Image (tube, rainbow, N blue to C red):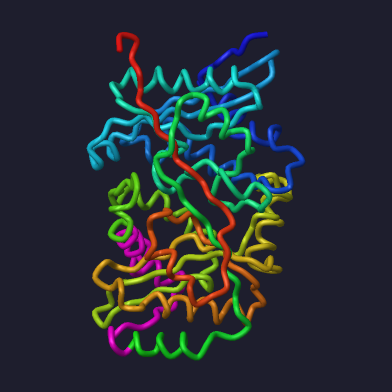
Amino acid sequence: MSVEIKKVLNKRDLRQFVTFPETLYKNNPYYVPPLVFDQMDTLDQEKGAAQEFCKSALYLAYKDGKPVGRVAAIVNFKANEQWSHKEVRFGWFDFIDDREVSAALMEKVYEFGRSHGMDSVVGPLGFTDFDPEGQLIAGYDRLSTMALIYNYPYYIDHIEAMGFGKDTDWIEYKVYIPDQLSDRLVRISKIVQQRCNVHLRPLTRKIIRKEQYGMKVFHLINDCYKDLYNFTVLPDHMARKYLDFYLSILDLRYLSMVENDKGELVAFGITMPSIARALQKSRGRLLPFGWWHLMKSMFIKHEEGVEMLLVGVRPDYQNTGINSLLFTDLFSRFSKWGVKWAETNAVLEDNLKNQGQWKDFENECVKRRRSYIKKLEYPND
């Protein structure tokens, strides 16, 4: 039977779109499902935070009446303007090992891009950098993380057969936490505090509310990352939609904030206990008992690893060694709590400065992921 492609039009379709990977990755020990409610909100055509500056369409593929694939076609007008290009993005691209299925889904992305006058197709990318991005091309035998994409090795063959080539790569590190920090690192962190006149700022929920600390972090994220690959600088009112979710689930003990003598935030480290196993047990659902698995992993009985979600230093404080202050603060706590390792978020392969942060610790590169690009062809080309 041929492939049938249907556009997502209602909540029932959307839930099927969000939960399709459950079937595709059933019994795969490395796949980690995202939180279903968060995905539903992100992809909702009316509620999604990025819909203000994005146009999108979601498609499901069916064969013999069963769902066999999905894809999101996205035009981020803000990013296109910021980067002076005309790209249609594809994201949430999952499919069975059937070339007819993947090609039919991608054809819908092409159609969507042409309807908006785009010049090229790029992905996997989300609406913004707060969404998962990059197709996994190495590290299939490693447990995935909450924030990033897992996919089967056959995805590479499918996408390259369509004529896509590499746009950029990201890499991820596993950093091992020492039982005791080196005297050198501790000494450097003290020197940095004195030389740069900075200090650590412990946070409480009251401080976050009173000082709108989430906005401070968000402004610094924009400042630190604005020049990185396809980053979308978001306005304040958009930030609140993201921050309300993340700050509600983060354990503040896993954050490290550095301020200068003026009380300005100049560096941050945002980490959290790994909840990958809890997400697998809960299948990404809070009900009926998924919330217990998640709360247990986050606040009661932690796994032996943490996820390093975001690390940033204000541009004018970079190359000062201020990173050592963040890591001394976080890793000393991790060591006391019995944490064995920290897995970084995806780091651009040409961001050598970021990769150099881990030189003082035992580490290994555990995963690589890729964003692909292709010229969008029109019928009369």
- Look at the image and tell me in which quarter the N terminus lies: top right
Q: Is residue 22 above or below residue 380?
A: below
Quadrant for residue 243, please give it. bottom left
Q: Residue at x 33, y 52 (%)?
A: 228
Q: Is residue 63 above or below residue 22?
A: above
Judged left or right of residue 342, residue 315 is left
Residue 227 percent coordinates (x, y):
28, 53
Q: Assign the magenta stretch its main secondary structure.
A: helix
Q: Residue at x 49, y 60 (%)?
A: 309
Quadrant for residue 222, please give it. bottom left
Residue 267 percent coordinates (x, y):
35, 71
Quadrant for residue 294, please give it. bottom right
Residue 344 percent coordinates (x, y):
52, 61
For the magenta stretch, what is the residue range?
A: 194-221
Judged left or right of residue 68, residue 195 is left
Residue 46 percent coordinates (x, y):
42, 32
> Could you say which is closer to the camera, residue 217 or residue 162?
162
Reply yes or no: does residue 197 show up in magenta. yes
> Could you say which is closer to the camera, residue 293 or residue 341?
341
